[in-house]
Amino acid sequence: MISKPFLRLLENSQPPETPPIWLMRQAGRYLPEYRATRETAGGFLDLCYNPALAEEVTLQPIRRYGFDASILFADILLIPQALGQKLWFETGEGPRLTPIMDASTLDGSDIMATLAPVIETVGRLSKSLPAETTLIGFAGAPWTVATYMVAGRGTPDQAPARELAEQQPEAFQAIIDVLVEATIEYLHAQVSAGAEVVQLFESWAGSLTGAAFERWCIEPVAKVVQGLRGRGVSVPIIGFPRAADHDMADYVARTACQILGLDTFADRKSLAANLPKEIILQGNLDPLTLVEGGAKLDAAIDEILQDFEGRRFVFNLGHGIVPQTPPEHVAQLVNRIRKN
Ligand code: CP3
């Protein structure tokens, strides 16, 4: 029998009594110990590329809460950096990149030279994590990463990338193609170093509809999954097409993900009732309810447990944990799930 509750979920066709739990962005600024380690590292990127400190911050939430899964500490924007794009983080604002309009300046020939420290972090974690904790690797899905590469920053509506995709589809396709190859290589390396599951973050799926969603979200993710399988990578894959108001059964079937991440606003009841039972769901507590805590948090947790009853699912948030979350509310959540 597999000793890891998260992996066991994939082996059995019946749901366990207690769902496995982890939280997106579980290592982060809401934890004082994260803030302290980050200070030691220098900047956020220095932390991502420092295997000993990245290992430490990945382990911090596991020590505190004993989550069933641990997500590698890194960022989805390390791939553009490894492709030669300049990346930095403006304090209090977020990522900045020198914007690109085509793939001419991208060089995918040796991305692992830049990403090697991240792979070292994975290797360290696979040895230092508790035996029952599953190690999750990740990358951004190509469309979401491309939105930052084209705009040079986060945008409310991803307009620069949508415009480029619309007006110069070949130039945009070339960027996506480079990302697909780089993502396969990077995730393959993560799994070879010990990642047991991988998640593809498609945070900006919601800004595409119809044929654009097919071409820029579904197809690239399907190619990444196929590319990984072609390289003998057999680990479960979590797809997280956030805010995508589309046919989720179709998304799962066409991308061939095993686990579907649901965002905060997903219609849990109808998805739980209508999606094929083989699809494992993940989500979708509102991160702001976790900030609120108390009876509201308990009620929201119970509602999720009830809506997913009879299905295999992974308890998580609908998006990343926010910095103002009181750490004791996370303890309240884990205790309630585990009925401690
Ligand atoms: O989940 C985890 O604990 C693992 C680490 C992780 C981070 N970012 C660390 C991080 C993961 C999986 C990500 C994914 C990521 N990064 C996404 C996809 C998920 C999502 O949130 O939509 C995106 C879009 C990014 C790009 C990114 N990184 C942005 C837009 C920002 C700025 C916003 C913010 O929260 O400050 C980051 C910075 C970032 N990535 C932080 C962390 C812990 C905060 C940096 C800090 O310590 O100051």
Image: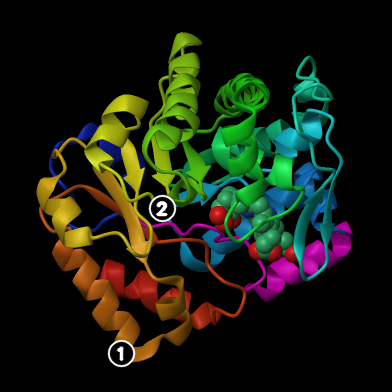
Magenta stretch in the rendered image: 21-42
Residue at which label 1 appears: 295
Q: Does 163 sit above or below residue 178? A: below
Task: Name the image quarter holding the N terminus.
Answer: top left
Q: Are marks 1 and 2 in contact (CB under 8 Å)?
A: no
Q: Position of residue 185 (x, y in %)?
A: 63, 20
Residue beneath the point at 52% across and 49% down: 204
Query: Can you name the residue that lies furthest to the bottom here?
Result: 295
Q: Residue at x 35, y 31 (%)?
A: 257
- Looking at the image, can residue 2 be seen? no
Q: Which corner quadrant of the image does residue 276 belong to?
A: top left
| Badge 2 residue CB within 8 Å of ligand 1 | no
5 up-or-down from 104: above or below: below
The 10 Å Cα crowd at callout 2, few under 14, some 14 to 19, many 20 or more, is: many
Task: Return the disc, 1 or 2, that comes first in the chain's sequence.
Answer: 2
The quadrant of the picture occupied by the C terminus is bottom left
Q: Find residue 60 and report its image quarter.
A: bottom right
Residue sitting nearer the eye, 18 or 143: 143
Counting labels gives 2
> Residue sitting at 33 percent across and 40 percent down?
259
Q: According to the image, label 2 marks what residue?
A: 68
Q: Is residue 31 magenta?
A: yes
Relative to 309, residue 208 above or below? above
Q: Horizontal and vertical percent for residue 63?
A: 55, 62
